[in-house]
Image (tube, rainbow, N blue to C red):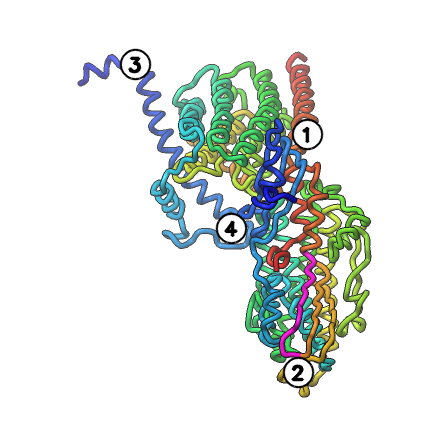
């Protein structure tokens, strides 16, 4: 590589070089664009309304979470996990806490495990509701987001009761959870489950079965299983391509093996099947929450013998949980000190975004927006 | 002074009075409809809508208008002349359009015998305005919006004209008041029953012509940020907005006149304007309801609806009307 190619940014090196070509339009979609959900920048090369090339450019929200992990102690690093993926923060909480617990072999009381399951699944419903509203907003339907936020409000209020925060949770602790759930929370959660059971069929009738919506989603962004696996896609994106892979079942953790729920899989591989997977997941999450509430045992919510000062032994550990967007993996290498030697976060959105360039090629601009929405990206999670 | 008035033709005074009334109406209508739209949206989305400024928030749009006027008029580095001509061009034909619309019996500023042609011709100018706005903005999103608006207008003028043509074929006139006179006072005497296909085609085309959701592709904010009016600030944007809401009333008025019996309705004829406005705002509410309910169609789907369904259907409709008229 010569010196000239090294200077200049991605745009000047890859797009401006052959700009003389006739009839081509290069458009910057983002970092400020209504349907990139944050600060994702996609450089789109178009011929008319058709996209000939789309390259996502990331890094506008990079906060060096991994590097911060190397200088903060294990306890100090916990709040960072609420800020990686703000929509499903509790799954990241769980990923990090779980990996440290695995490394230090900390026992978690059963009650704490159930509380974790309930709150994490509530958070998953919140995450999917936000996605649902925002995706339909991308498709030009303004109303659903108001309804989804209405539902989400109830769940967020409930989570606020036990966690103290509404978005960037920091609730799980090494060996349990921060506070015990109250009776008000349990009753409220049961009401929330009832509400969701009423609301989800209504959404299906009014939105999912809408003719225009189905025309905008069906056979759009067809992602074959082979391609999804090549890019390492996980979560609803992979399950929308027909692969039954869910960390809660394939690499079981916590008390998930005791709970009865299904992994929704749709094999049409298009945006609509990813849509259906997420909607079905909300139903399953409601099921999980109801079961977990019934099975919630009495006892400690925090392990009494949990160490106050975390100083894990030398070694490395990998722990994965299922987040709203896919497999969340946390890999920690410990050198025996109070800070990790290296902390690697595997974020599902990063892999899911990387397949966008191939998926969007040759589609219409409106379809690209639909595809981008159907991948359910959270930009801070991509950049970390 | 008195002698001077004698030399002014009565017709001109009539038009002038009408014009003043129409300009006042356009302004008030714009303010009212924006408020209604937001309240309707609020009602559909289970939220209160504007309620802070004035009782029930009725002064909200007035406050917004004042804010828009107070804003800096920013023009991008494109063609500044075209850029500022565009919003004016979007607004300018509107008084003309309203002039030809008979609101009640003899309640019309200018009852042209080619009134329908006048309205259809001048409502087509809107496309030129969007085109200039897109070009003058020096912005790729605006350009895409302009390109979309042109092909959308081309696609949807044809079925609209064909649907209108079927009505004129039946009534044998292009004068709007004569078309209303051809219909009776009761709903079953209106043209929407004899021409259901034409009515539906016209309604769909009206949504597309006014760039309303689900056919709001020229501004499609989740794809093109804001389409043709991305770069406009202050009253430049305000004029486009005003034009959109006024043209909603225009297409609804034409629809009322052609298919829903205009000012005709049970009761004394002097109250005809009440019937007229009730029907017009009923249709406007329908357009709002559609906007807040449906997702946006894709661009090729939009063109397909027109070229593959609406145009053949309206041609058949024309054929059917011709056969009925001849027999």
Are marks 3 and 4 in one subunit? yes
* Camera-side mark, 4 or 1: 1
Subunit of label 1: B
Residue at image mark 2: A302
User: Marks 1 and 2, how far apart in space?
Assistant: 62 Å
Q: Nearer the viewer, residue B52 or B74?
A: B74
Please identify, in this view, whether the residue under mark 1 or under mark 2 is nearer the observer.
2
Q: CA distance from mark 4 to mark 2?
A: 45 Å
Q: Which residue is mark 3?
A: B9
- Circle nearer the N terminus (3, 1): 3
Q: Nearer the viewer, mark 3 or mark 1?
A: 1
| Chain for disc number 2 | A
* Tag 4 subunit: B
Q: Which residues are magenta?
A: A337-349
Q: Position of residue A125 (x, y in %)?
A: 66, 62
The crowd level at tag 2 (other Cα within 10 Å; few <14, some 14-19, many 20+) is: many
Provide the secondary structure element on which disc 1 rests: helix
Q: Is B253 included in the stretch rendered in magenta? A: no
């Amino acid at each position: 590589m010569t010196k000239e190619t090294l200077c200049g940014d991605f745009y000047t090196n890859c797009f401006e070089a052959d700009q003389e070509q006739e009839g081509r339009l290069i458009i910057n979609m983002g970092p400020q664009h209504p349907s990139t959900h944050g600060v994702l920048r996609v450089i789109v090369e178009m011929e008319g309304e058709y996209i000939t090339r789309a390259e996502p450019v990331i890094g506008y929200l990079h906060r060096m979470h991994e590097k911060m992990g190397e200088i903060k102690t294990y306890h100090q690093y916990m709040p960072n996990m609420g800020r990686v993926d703000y929509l499903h923060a509790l799954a990241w909480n769980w990923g990090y806490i779980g990996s440290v617990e695995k490394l230090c072999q900390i026992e978690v009381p059963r009650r704490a495990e159930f509380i974790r399951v309930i709150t994490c699944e509530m958070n998953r419903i919140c995450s999917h509701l936000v996605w649902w509203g925002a995706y339909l907003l991308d498709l030009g339907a303004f109303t659903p987001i108001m309804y989804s936020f209405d539902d989400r409000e109830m769940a967020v209020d409930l989570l606020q009761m036990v966690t103290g925060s509404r978005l960037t949770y920091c609730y799980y602790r090494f060996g349990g959870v921060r506070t015990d759930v109250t009776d008000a929370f349990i009753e409220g959660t049961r009401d929330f489950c009832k509400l969701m059971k009423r609301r989800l069929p209504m959404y299906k009738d009014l939105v999912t079965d809408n003719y225009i919506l189905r025309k905008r989603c069906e056979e759009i962004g067809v992602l074959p299983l082979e391609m999804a696996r090549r890019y390492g896609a996980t979560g609803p994106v992979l399950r929308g391509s027909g692969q039954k892979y869910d960390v809660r079942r394939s690499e079981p953790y916590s008390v998930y093996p005791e709970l009865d729920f299904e992994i929704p899989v749709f094999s049409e591989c298009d945006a609509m099947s990813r849509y259906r997977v997420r909607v079905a997941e909300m139903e399953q999450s409601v099921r999980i929450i109801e079961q977990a509430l019934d099975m919630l045992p009495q006892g400690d919510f925090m392990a009494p013998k949990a160490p106050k000062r975390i100083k894990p032994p030398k070694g490395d550990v990998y722990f994965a949980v299922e987040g709203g967007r896919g497999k969340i993996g946390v890999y920690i290498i410990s050198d025996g000190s109070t800070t990790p030697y290296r902390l690697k976060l595997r974020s599902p959105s990063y892999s899911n975004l990387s397949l966008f360039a191939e998926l969007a090629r040759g589609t219409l601009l409106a379809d690209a927006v639909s595809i981008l929405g159907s991948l359910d990206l959270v930009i801070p999670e991509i950049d970390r | 002074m008195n002698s001077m008035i004698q030399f002014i033709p009565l017709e001109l005074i009539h038009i002038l009075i009408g014009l003043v009334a129409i300009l006042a109406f356009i302004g008030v209508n714009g303010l009212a409809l924006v408020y209604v739209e937001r309240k309707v949206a609020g009602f559909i989305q289970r939220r209160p809508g504007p309620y802070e400024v004035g009782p029930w928030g009725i002064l909200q749009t007035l406050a917004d208008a004042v804010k828009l006027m107070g804003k800096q008029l920013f023009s991008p580095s494109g063609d500044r002349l075209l850029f500022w001509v565009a919003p004016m061009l979007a607004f300018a034909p509107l008084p003309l359009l309203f002039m030809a619309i008979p609101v009640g019996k003899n309640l019309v500023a200018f009852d042209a015998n080619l009134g329908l042609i006048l309205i259809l011709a001048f409502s087509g100018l809107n496309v030129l305005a969007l085109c200039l706005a897109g070009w003058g903005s020096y912005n790729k999103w605006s350009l895409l919006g302009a390109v979309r608006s042109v092909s959308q207008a081309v696609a949807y003028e044809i079925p609209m004209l064909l649907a209108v043509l079927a009505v004129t074929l039946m009534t044998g006139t292009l004068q709007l008041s004569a078309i209303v006179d051809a219909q009776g006072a009761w709903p079953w005497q209106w043209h929407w029953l004899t021409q259901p296909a034409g009515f539906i085609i016209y309604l769909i085309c009206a949504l597309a012509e006014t760039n309303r959701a689900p056919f709001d592709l020229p501004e499609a904010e989740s794809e093109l940020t804001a389409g043709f009016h991305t770069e406009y600030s202050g009253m430049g944007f305000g004029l486009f907005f005003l034009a959109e809401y006024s043209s909603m009333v225009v297409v609804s008025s034409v629809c009322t006149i052609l298919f829903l019996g205009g000012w005709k309705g049970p009761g004394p004829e002097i109250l005809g304007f009440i019937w007229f406005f009730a029907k017009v705002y009923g249709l406007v509410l329908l357009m709002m309801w559609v906007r807040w309910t449906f997702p946006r169609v894709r661009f090729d789907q939009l063109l397909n609806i027109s070229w593959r369904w609406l145009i053949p259907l309206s041609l058949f409709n024309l054929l059917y009307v011709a056969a009925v008229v001849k027999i």
